[in-house]
Image (cartoon, rainbow, N blue to C red):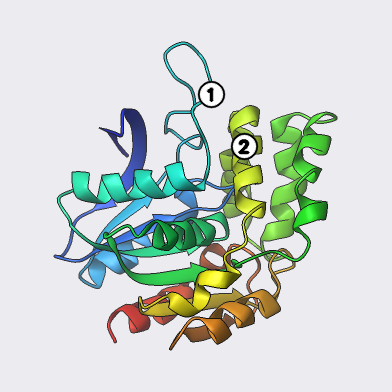
Amino acid sequence: MEIRTVRNIRIAFDLRTGGDELVVFIHGVGADRTSWKYQLEAFQNAGYSVAAIDMRGSGDSQSRDEHGALLKIDLEEFARDVDALIRELGFSKAHWVGNSKGGVIILEALLLGLASVDKIVLCNTFAKHPDSAAILPRAAAALRQKTMPEFAAERIPLVLKPDIDAATLAEAIYAMARKDPEAYLASWQATWSPDFRGMLSSITNPTLVVSSTLDMITPTALSDELACHIPHAKLVVLEGAGHISNLDQPEAFNQAVLAFLQS
């Protein structure tokens, strides 16, 4: 793990150097950088430099300022943090790969016109979630009754395939359980609120959309919408994977994304 100060906050990330092109991996709302554990070596071995990032409010990145106040947590801040870290690492562009919230952050980065975005991979994500009105209050309601560790132990099994190995399940639960609850709720609100449908047809970046057959959080219809409306987007559906498809079926995920990046 490395930590750099970008945009006046501490951002933690795992870095593997390997090539002149950088791939950045952006996790979902309940995850952190460790959810990309199966991608780091594979993509480095394929000739890329790789950074898996803890977004502000998650993992070992900063959640609060020196006075204890919660940092501003929204999609724009997330996107600008990634953009700044790319430049901090000495790159002008990177391929952005995002799962769930990570995909929403990529769409925000495109809306902002951030110049560091090269090819994009939108994994198990959406332009607008049709159930957002029902989803938005759920986390706050749950956390009025449960601790973060209790909520994590309840929720994380829903986002992974039923037969996920015990070690990976435990790591994923821990990643969510250690989040600052207030930061988590702000991130939750940022994730499920936006509507990017109106901008999809204007995306010119080469795009891969990844969905999976067991994903009950973002069903394949939402990926179909992305692939249908983003010009020339490619769509891959991974069999036997849930919402965090890169953890559930890492070999198939890596093969699909690398084939896209190398095309």
Tag 2 near tag 1, CB within 8 Å: yes
Is residue 76 positioned above or below 130 on the image?
A: above
Residue 142 % position (x, y): 82, 37
Between marks 2 and 1, how big is the CA–CA gap?
Answer: 9 Å
* Rendered image quadrant of residue 224: bottom right
Quarter of the figure with the C terminus? bottom left
Q: Residue at x 44, y 54 (%)?
A: 26
Graded by Cα atoms within 10 Å as few (under 14), some (14 to 19) or many (20 or more), the crowding at tag 1 reads: some
The residue where tag 2 is placed is 186
Q: Residue at x 50, y 48 (%)?
A: 75
Q: Nearer the viewer, residue 114 or 137?
A: 114
The kind of residue on which mark 2 rests is Ala
For label 2, the SS is helix
For label 1, the SS is loop
Is residue 89 positioned above or below 257 on the image?
A: above
Q: Nearer the viewer, residue 168 or 116?
A: 116
The residue where tag 1 is placed is 70
Graded by Cα atoms within 10 Å as few (under 14), some (14 to 19) or many (20 or more), the crowding at tag 2 reads: some
- Tell me how many marks there are: 2
Q: Nearer the viewer, residue 188 or 166?
A: 188
Residue 120 % position (x, y): 39, 70
One can see residue 38 in this view? no
Quarter of the figure with the N terminus? top left
Residue 171 % position (x, y): 56, 45
Q: Residue at x 66, y 44 (%)?
A: 189
The kind of residue on which mark 1 rests is Leu
| Left or right relative to 177: residue 70 | left
One can see residue 14 in this view? yes
- Mark before the other along the chain sequence, 2 or 1: 1
Q: Residue at x 59, y 28 (%)?
A: 180
